[in-house]
Image (cartoon, grey):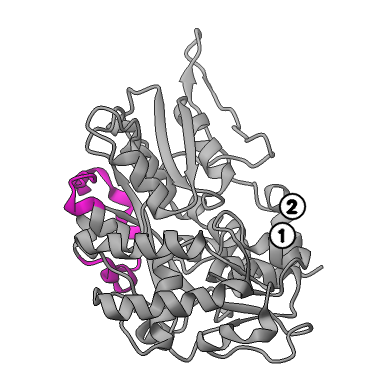
Amino acid sequence: MNAYKIFRSVRQILFGVALVSMVGCSAGGETSSQEITTSSGFVCNEPSPRLEVESTSINIYTWAEYIPADVIECFGLVYGIDVNTDFFSSNEELYSKVAIGEGINPYDVIHPSDYMIGVLMREGLLQQLDKSKLPNLVNLNQDLVSAYGDALDYLVPYQMGTQAIVYNSETVANPPTSWEDLWNPEYVDRIVSIDDNRVVIGATLLTLGYDVNTTDKAELQEAKQKLLELMPNIRVFDSDSPKTALISGEVDLGIVWNGEAFLVQQENPAFVYVYPEEGSIIFYDGMGISPTAPHPDAAYAWLNYLLQGNNNWLTLVDYPYTNPNDAALAYAKDHAPDVYEAYINSNVTNTPAEEFLKGHEVIDLGADLLLYDEIWTEVKE
């Protein structure tokens, strides 16, 4: 077992050394302190700064397996509020929940990625942020988050990364180097893919020399026909935990996010992450506040708490994508050097700049998004 895997299993013991002081006056005027821990034994960090929160609950809608459970639990404990968390596995599922009408969306904080960010902004489903209530934005690497553009007015950056190919070098005799290679008849029933129409259709478009954001109906029809030819190779679609099928040996190739590929490698170093010759599909995501948020004070407190370096660094352990939080990296370097070195020295998690430049970003296509939805429905029938 490598040092990174050992750390993942016992991090709450080795590095749960931060004390949370809940200071209060007793009847005799004395102060007392109390260490707050999660159900796993992780010692919670005090909010820095602590914001005024009158709400007694918060409703968060986020990706499955994406936010460290200890951070979610700690937030509720240190602020004394109930944290209600629902999970989705695709941008489309998120949209279906938050776009059902004013007064029906119950969420305070929502967590879109890539093209869905633009959709929610366009449709008024993200509240413009009051950055005076987000002092911990200073922890972010401004060069990296500049990729978010105007979305920074509506979104707090969380993670970034790539969607590309992973394969088991011990079982795949002819490894892929491009998206085109995935059509190899040797790969029948051997691929797990994230359930994301823009990524999978986008990769198919790249093999044809087309743009991942094309709205040309002839090009999309051609991509549909080619994608139908790929379907026998895909054994399972899974956006909740695509690593599971790879680690278990059910499949030995995947179209996955870079963080999932890194976790697979920690379990089995035989797996290799490939940046396709045509370029990967890049993504960035973040959290915003719903315009109908019932608990906006708790929402701002949550966003600040997640931005703290001594909380955010846990993403490097649990969900290691490309992290734009400089304070988190600095904290890990000082307190968890094995985790920091594994992250910073990996071209999977610490995405090379040239791969970001070579990559392709899927964007909001307005009404033409329906073209992709229709193709996806027909292909998966």
User: Please, what is the dominant secondary structure of the magenta stretch?
Assistant: helix
Residue 341 against residue 133 in the figure, above or below: below
Q: Are the residues flagged by discs 1 and 2 in contact, CB closer than 8 Å? A: yes
73 or 166: nearer the viewer? 166
Query: Who's the residue at 44% across and 77% down the image?
Result: 225
Q: Mark 1 falls on what kind of element?
A: helix
Q: Is residue 23 left or right of residue 122?
A: right
- The reply to whether residue 19 is visible in this rendering is yes
Residue under pointer 1: 7
Query: Who's the residue at 53% across and 37% down the image?
Result: 74
Q: Is residue 255 magenta?
A: no
The numbered disc on residue 86 is none
Q: Residues within 10 Å of mark 2 (few under 14, many from 20)?
A: some
The amino acid beneath tag 1 is Phe
Query: Who's the residue at 71% across and 75% down the image?
Result: 252
Q: Which quadrant, please, contains the N terminus?
A: bottom right
Query: Who's the residue at 65% across and 63% down the image?
Result: 243
Instruction: Give the distance between the C-alpha atoms of the residues marked 1 and 2, in whole angstroms.
Output: 5 Å
Q: Is residue 38 left or right of residue 93?
A: right
Residue under pointer 2: 10
Give how far across and how far down residue 105 sits, in percent: 31, 33
Q: Which stretch appears magenta?
A: 120-149
Q: Is residue 134 magenta?
A: yes
- The reply to whether residue 326 is visible in this rendering is no
Q: Residues within 10 Å of mark 1 (few under 14, many from 20)?
A: some
81 or 109: nearer the viewer? 109
Name the residue at the right extreme.
Answer: 1
Q: Is residue 253 left or right of residue 115?
A: right
